[in-house]
Amino acid sequence: MTIIDVVDLKKYFTLSTPILEMETGVVKAVNGISFHINHGETLGLVGESGSGKTTTGKLILRLLKPTAGKILLEGRDISKISDREFRAIRKDLQVVFQNPYASLDPKMTIQDILTQPLTIHKIVQPLEYSKEVVRLLNLVGLSKKDANRFPHEFSGGQRQRIGIARAISTKPKFIVCDEPVSALDVSIQSQILNLMMDLQREFKLSYLFIAHGLNVIKHVSNRVAVMYLGKIVEVGNAETIFNTPKHPYTKALISASPIPDPDIKRERIILKDEIPSPINIPTGCTFHTRCAECMDICRSNEPELQGLDEHQIACHLVNF
Ligand code: SF4
C-alpha cells in the first residue's frame, strides 16, 4: 500500500528583471515526475545538484506550491487542500535537513527545541513534556542531561541526532530526509544512517531519502529513483538499479561511487560537460548532450519512462 503518490508533478520558477519586471526565463526545476512510496519503505532519490531532488522534497512538504500535478498522502491530494486542513496533518510529514548546524536555533535549549513540536501538535499533555523529551533523547542515543544544553555544545553527529529526535517527536508517518549525512564526517555517517533505519523499523516510518551520492542511497533504500534535469530517468528496486542499471546516466553515477573492496575494479564512466541549465533544457532526451551512446532520435524525441513497476527506464536504447 502506498503512503505517497506523486503524479505528473511540476515546479517552474519564472525569472524576471527586477527593474523592468520582464520575464527573462523559466527554470523547470521539476518537470513532470511521477512516483510512489510504499508504507514502511525508503525511496532513495539521487542525482547531481540541479536535478530537482530538493525541490521535489519541498513540494511534498508543501514548502513550495506546485505548478501542476498531484501529491497524494494516503490517497488525499495535499497539494489542493487549504492551509487549515494541512495544519491538521502536518505532524504526519516531517523533515530531517542536510545541515544540522543551521537547522537548530542556537538560542534554544534542546528541551525547548523538542518541546516546541509537542506543544504545536498537542502530542502529549504539558505535564508530560519533560518525560517525553527524555524519551526522544534516549531514542536517538542521547541522554537526559543533554536536555538543558544548547546546540553549539554538541558535535555535528549529535546535532543531527537532535534533528532526528525533533522529526520523530510528532509521531510522523513519513519523513523527507534531505541529504541528512552529507555535512557529517564519513566516520559518523553510518551511525546516523543505522539510527534512521532502526527508527524506521521501530515506528514503521516511510522515507524519501535525498542524496547526491549513490553509496549512501545504496545503504538505506528499498527502491531508487534517479533524477536528471527535473525528470526521473530510471526507477526501481534498489538491487535491480545497482546490479543491472540500464540508463547511461545511472551507469555513470554508479561507476563514480567508491567500492569498499580494493580488489574489485570498476571502469569509471566520465560524463562530458556539466549538467545543462534547467532554464535551457536540451530537446529530445535531456541527457543527450552528455550521453556517449546518443543516437539521432535522442536529439529530437523525448523517451518516456517505461517498464514494469520493479524497473522503469526512460531511454531509446532500452527495448520493452
Ligand atoms: Fe543516451 Fe539516447 Fe538513452 Fe538519452 S535516450 S540516455 S541520449 S541513449
Image (cartoon, helix red, strand yellow):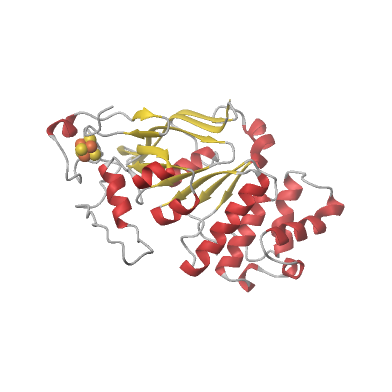
Task: Indicate whether 57 appears above or below 312.
Answer: below
The image quadrant where one finds ligand 1 is top left
Q: Position of residue 102 (x, y in %)?
A: 54, 61
Q: Quadrant of the C terminus?
A: top left
* Residue 88 lies in quadrant: top right
- One can see residue 99 in this view: yes
- One can see residue 13 in this view: no
In-front residue for pair 69/256: 256
Q: Position of residue 66 (x, y in %)?
A: 46, 33
Q: Position of residue 4 (x, y in %)?
A: 54, 34
Q: Quadrant of the N terminus?
A: top right
In-front residue for pair 155/189: 189
Q: Residue furthest front?
A: 263
Residue at image point 19% right, 52% down: 272
Q: Describe residue 187's horizontal placement relative to residue 295 as left or right.
A: right
Q: Describe residue 112's horizontal placement relative to residue 81 as left or right.
A: right
In-front residue for pair 151/268: 268
In-front residue for pair 261/207: 261
Q: Residue furthest right?
A: 127
Residue at image point 33% right, 67% down: 262
Residue at image point 60% right, 28% down: 81
